[in-house]
């Protein structure tokens, strides 16, 4: 990559570099793509909800795993009672739904306000 392309990749949070690098490693058959299929399956299963990260959080009692059932229920009530409005379209809904709505339409997710 040229210096200008590298700078652009840094600005975009590495998305461009990651896409190009991933394609390149696949073409060359190196890194993840050099592993046998069985090893690839093991590598894929090591993250996310059922993998190492989730198990470790549960063992250490951090994040959501550190909360009691009552605390989780209270947090859900607070979150689910909130309504937010998109500043560009005026669409009003819950925070998670509004994020998906805005992303699907290419709207910056910071363009929102909380509605009582």
Image: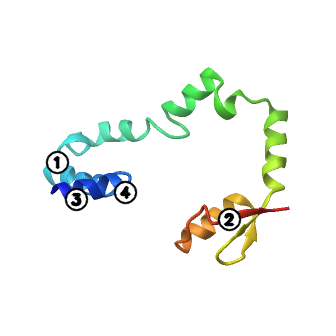
- Per the rendering, the mark at residue 12 is 4
- Per the rendering, the mark at residue 112 is 2
Task: Tell me which numbered mark, 1 or 2, is placed earlier along the sequence.
Answer: 1
Q: Secondary structure at mark 1?
A: loop
Task: Tell me which numbered mark, 4 or 3, is placed earlier along the sequence.
Answer: 3
- The reply to whether callout 4 and callout 3 are in contact (CB within 8 Å) is no
- The N terminus: image quadrant: bottom left
Quadrant of the rendered structure where residue 87 is? Answer: bottom right
Task: Tell me which numbered mark, 4 or 1, is placed earlier along the sequence.
Answer: 4
How packed mark 1 is, by other alpha carbons closer than 10 Å (few <14, some 14-19, many 20 or more), is few
Q: Secondary structure at mark 4?
A: loop
Nearest-to-viewer mark from 1 and 3: 3
Gap in angstroms between the C-alphas marked 4 and 3 = 11 Å
> Front-most of 14 and 42?
14
How packed mark 2 is, by other alpha carbons closer than 10 Å (few <14, some 14-19, many 20 or more), is many
Q: Give the residue displayed 79% in from the left and 46% down from the top.
A: 76
Residue 1 in view, yes or no: no
Task: Tell me which numbered mark, 2 or 3, is placed earlier along the sequence.
Answer: 3
Task: Tell me which numbered mark, 1 or 3, is placed earlier along the sequence.
Answer: 3
Label 3 sits on residue: 5
Label 1 sits on residue: 29
Viewed as shown, does residue 92 lie left or right of 14?
right
Gap in angstroms between the C-alphas marked 1 and 2 = 44 Å
Q: Give the residue displayed 30% in from the left and 55% down from the top.
A: 9
Taking the view exactly as shown, the residue that stands out farthest to the top is: 60
Nearest-to-viewer mark from 1 and 2: 2
- On the image, the x and y values in percent for residue 19 come to 29, 57
């Amino acid at each position: 990559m040229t210096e200008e392309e590298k700078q652009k990749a840094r600005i975009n949070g590495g998305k461009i570099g990651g896409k190009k690098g991933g394609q390149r490693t696949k073409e060359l058959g190196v890194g993840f793509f050099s592993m046998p299929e069985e090893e690839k399956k093991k590598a894929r299963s090591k993250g996310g909800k059922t993998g190492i990260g989730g198990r470790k959080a549960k063992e250490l009692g951090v994040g959501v795993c550190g909360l009691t059932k009552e605390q989780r229920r209270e947090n859900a009530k607070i979150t689910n009672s909130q309504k937010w409005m998109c500043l560009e379209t005026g669409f009003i809904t819950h925070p998670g739904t509004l994020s998906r709505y805005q992303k699907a339409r290419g709207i910056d997710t910071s363009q929102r306000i909380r509605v009582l």
